[in-house]
Amino acid sequence: MNHVINVQVENKPGVLARVASMFAGRGFNIHSLAVGPTADPTLSRMTVVVDGPEMEQIIKQLYKLVHTVKVTELTSGQGIEREIMIVRVNAEASKRGEIIEAADIFKAKTIDVGMASLTFELAGEPDTLADFQELMQPYGVIDLAKSGRIAMARDAKSKDGTKARLRSA
Amino acid sequence: MSKTMTGAQALIYALEGQGVDIVFGVPGGAILPAYDPILDSRIRHVLARHEQGAGHMASGYAHATGRVGVMIATSGPGATNLITPLQDCYMDSIPVVAITGQVATHSIGNDAFQEAHTWGISMPATKHNYLITDVNDIPEVINEAFHLAATGRPGPILVDVPKDVLAATMTWHDAPPTKLPGYKPSVKGHPRQVKAAIEMIQQAERPVLYTGGGVIRAEASAELRQFAEMANLPVVTTLMARGAMPDSHPLSLGMSGMHGCYTATTAIQQADLLVAMAARFDDRVTGEVKSFAPNAKVIHVDVDPAEIGKVRNAEVPIVGDAKVVLGQLLHQLERTLDDAAPPARTEWFDQLAEWQHDFPLAFDQDPDGPIQQQYVIAELRRITNGDAIIVAGVGQHQMWAAQFGGFEKPNTWINSGGLGTMGYAVPAAVGAKAGKPDDTVFAIDGDGCFQMTMQELITASVEGIPVKIAVMNNGALGMVRQWQKLFYHERFSATDLTNHTPDYVKLAEAMGCVGLRAERPADVGPMLEKALAINDKPVVIDFVCDPEAMVFPMVVAGGSNDHVIMGPEDLPRPDGPQPEDVI
């Protein structure tokens, strides 16, 4: 099962290497990792998706790194998760119509059109991306890139989870 | 003080400010600027003959004194040679700071002469590390480095300083208090957990206080003893904790684990409660984890939260400094007992006494046979009365020293436990003696270990650091040979050293030491006495020992601690453990 961990780290040189080295050295698997700034310029946020049962050890080992400020595990539903994907599919003239139609349902944006291919951009929940990817598979996926998941905890004050999801969409 | 100085001067000035009195190092190109102000400093520099030696010296110094040890090396090979001592200190939680030179900032990444990516290489071998790119950062970085090395779970810190940073000028400013938002080690245990622990201890019928090296690092031996006595708990000391509880104390069971004594290992197996005090359930202690102490509940006290639950789940986890938590436990116990006696646990103590009687640590010294290493150690223990600081390398001699050293005080047993670094003893002894010049420092070393780092005896004689080294010369890489004997059908691959080349007496003399030799059991006592009487030079004694001797008791690597092998006759063969099963 995949777990999503949010790691707030001091924005210092080499901090990504420290986190990556810890994961490698301890034998923990990283499924995806995304790093970026936060609203506070002294902090960066890493969203790490890991698989494996050793969540408690992973969190403790992350805390052991001197530059780690806060680690939050986001279990399903607690977090707002987003990912962006760029996918290029085979699109010969006869199939083009139905491919674009399918992309429209997902609100995927066409960002490149070639002689025999179409390239889409889709941002959203990881499940949605997976669904879209599956839908494109039969046409022939030529290339695909994903940003890795980014996530943050839902606002604890929001009682109504559904509403919060809608607002953030 | 607001004074203009170079980065090099600032570095040395910052070290002085941390109370550093001695550093161990080897100079070279990139670190050259830092060596100039050392000449004008009150800090003593000990010139090691190899950077690895300098690193282990800093470690031995830190072990013996409890203060932060400092090692210095140049860039490239100087820095890479420090990796072994750094990893060694990391595994054993020894506070040290390494200062390494680096090529000039504009050359970094250009494969410059003697360039290595020291920051990257040392990252997994240190608690934290730095590359200084601005001369003005020196006061803060040195301050943080010493703070990190000594607080929380102690460990090694490396500070890499490029040559141009050392040469640049700055105006000195005192470092402000360290600001590390992500580093706040817990010191005090949670009161509710402390209370739960005492309740559990009071109810236990077969408890064991399983003590780790953290007790020594936390300087908590007095509290440990007081707590064991007040709660009436038998005490097991791990390899790293030898000396935390006096071996002569009636509650002491000695060392447990792979080569631990039967009673200590079996007491843990049969316990209904383990009070793990700053111990980390190392594989050499637990053997096969799933059969380790199968009926015991666990109270785990550790300053490092990541150790709790890493190997064994704890019913009562307590994150905190061992000294502080022991103080809290004592306080809570006092309130609970309120003049009442703790549980007597007569059945349990009777059982332990029976095991101690039936399965003691023992050896036979045939007066006409070859010298047994255990005999040398027992004689040393007898003659020095447990007052000497014993330093060991890694292997058979180390295990025998741990078994028969008879440790009465903390910081009198120094060895490489976690990493198992052969060659540790000679340089670590030099560091220990430099830090504790009034104490007798006696290294028990194997001949294999000795040949790895013996050149540091040159350092010892030139610097006037009179250590004593007992070379247990069995002409073999003894522990490896023992495993070949037990698990590889006596196929002795690459473990023969011969016991006459080199000639250790001549070698000692060539390095400015006194060289002695003992070939018969009757020579052992007199040679030790002779060595102890020499205090102006390092002494090496070549003890020509039995090559066939094996360390027992023994639990096969990865095997269950339920099966303690007391001697070769206990070994289940040939259907016993096969080579692929042992690590």
Image (cartoon, rainbow, N blue to C red):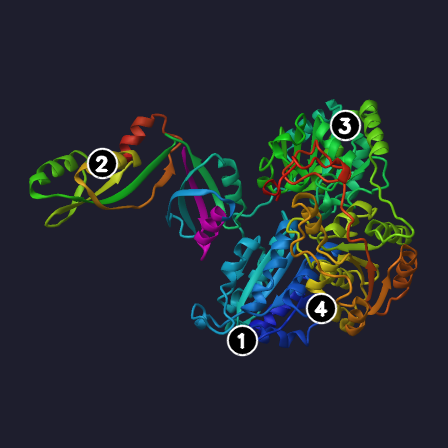
What amino acid type is highlighted by mark number 2? Phe
* Pair 2/1: label in front: 2
The part of the chain drawn in magenta is A1-24
Residues tagged by mark 3 and mark 4 found on one chain of the structure: yes
Q: Chain of mark 3?
A: B
Q: Chain of mark 1?
A: B
Residues tagged by mark 1 and mark 3 found on one chain of the structure: yes
Q: Which residue is mark 1?
A: B167
The residue positioned 52% from the left and 59% from the top of the image is B121
Alpha carbons under labels 1 and 3: distance apart: 61 Å
How many marks can you see? 4
Residues tagged by mark 2 and mark 4 found on one chain of the structure: no
Q: Which residue is mark 2?
A: A132
Query: Does A22 lie within the magenta span?
Result: yes
Alpha carbons under labels 3 and 4: distance apart: 56 Å
Q: Chain of mark 2?
A: A
Alpha carbons under labels 2 and 4: distance apart: 67 Å
What amino acid type is highlighted by mark number 3? Arg
The answer to whether mark 1 and mark 4 are in CB contact below 8 A is no
**Residue B335, which numbered label?**
3
